[in-house]
Image: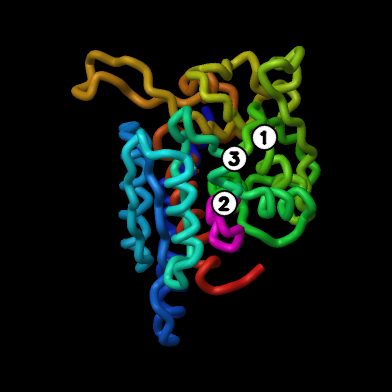
Amino acid sequence: MAIVIDGKAIASEVRNEVRINVEKWTSLGHPPPFLAVVLVGDNPASASYVRGKIKASHDAGIDGETYSFDATISEKDLLDFIRKLNDRPNVNGILVQLPLPDHIDASNVIATLDPNKDVDGLHTVNAGRLATDLPGFVPCTPAGIVELLSRSNIPTQGKHAVIIGRSNLVGRPLGSLLLRKDVNATVTICHSRTQNLPDICQQADILIAAIGRAHFVTADMIKPGATVIDVGINRVNDPSKKRGYRLTGDVDYEAVSDIAGYITPVPGGVGPMTIALLLNNTLIAATRNF
Ligand code: GUN
């Protein structure tokens, strides 16, 4: 039976460390770090994530504010607002919650962010820094996954890490992070067109599922004793729940738990780490220049 990696407990450790470092920073006479979160439209999942991010910021002594816009805002007006945030000296970090409405090109929005305030690490400057092993902002979910592995003492040196998913938010940056010389994993990135996916997954010492499809990873894809990290947060209908749905990951948790050595639950695995690393990035944005 796999050991469950308690993302909530590890995230709480990280958040506490950030809170202590924020206190040290403000005790030197600096204002608290300030995170601006931009939310467009009324996607309930996005609204809930944003509330979580702001609450966690406040708990860590970080000033956080949400700027909400109607789904009908024009791309131009949104870009103008982001330029204003770029220009405000008291704003250290800016996060634009994704996804954005279809009429807005997310890549234009990300390109408008000041790279030195891009706490999500999505601007091409930060993506390029990560890809070329230079210091910069690292996207919060991949950074959180590497922190989970390290704080759970899961060996990565020379191990085969297989990532399913090639998104800019998770799969690609995670590949770069796992290749860093302090992690030293051997990395394979798979996607929807990968041939023989189950065979490749079976070779993984560490398997990371980030595809956004409920229960995609099944027990037959797991090498016995492997570490399985589940990035998925899928809503599946569940009439037995008051809200009518439940959250489930990309991994068939029950069956995979019988084969894996370590596994992250959903919820309570990667999700809390994403928020913890966002707080850390916001503190970095306030305290240093890359
Ligand atoms: N939507 C889902 N995850 C994320 C994230 O980490 N950052 C942003 N900006 N949007 C998201």
Q: Which residue is mark 2?
A: 112
Q: Which residue is mark 1?
A: 206
The picture quadrant where one finds residue 171 is top right
- Which residues fall within the magenta stretch? 112-121
| Residue located at (75% from left, 13% from top) | 196
Magenta segment's dominant SS is: loop
| Residue located at (50% from left, 29% from top) | 232
Q: Is residue 143 visible?
A: no
The x and y percentages for residue 134 are 75, 59
Q: Is residue 160 visible?
A: yes
Label 3 CA crowd tier, 10 Å (few <14, some 14–19, many 20+): few
Residue type at tag 2: Thr
| Residue located at (36% from left, 45% from top) | 50
Circle 2: element type: helix
Front one among 228 and 122: 122
Circle 1: element type: strand
Q: Which residue is mark 3?
A: 107
In this rendering, position of residue 270 left or right of residue 60:
right
Label 1 CA crowd tier, 10 Å (few <14, some 14–19, many 20+): many
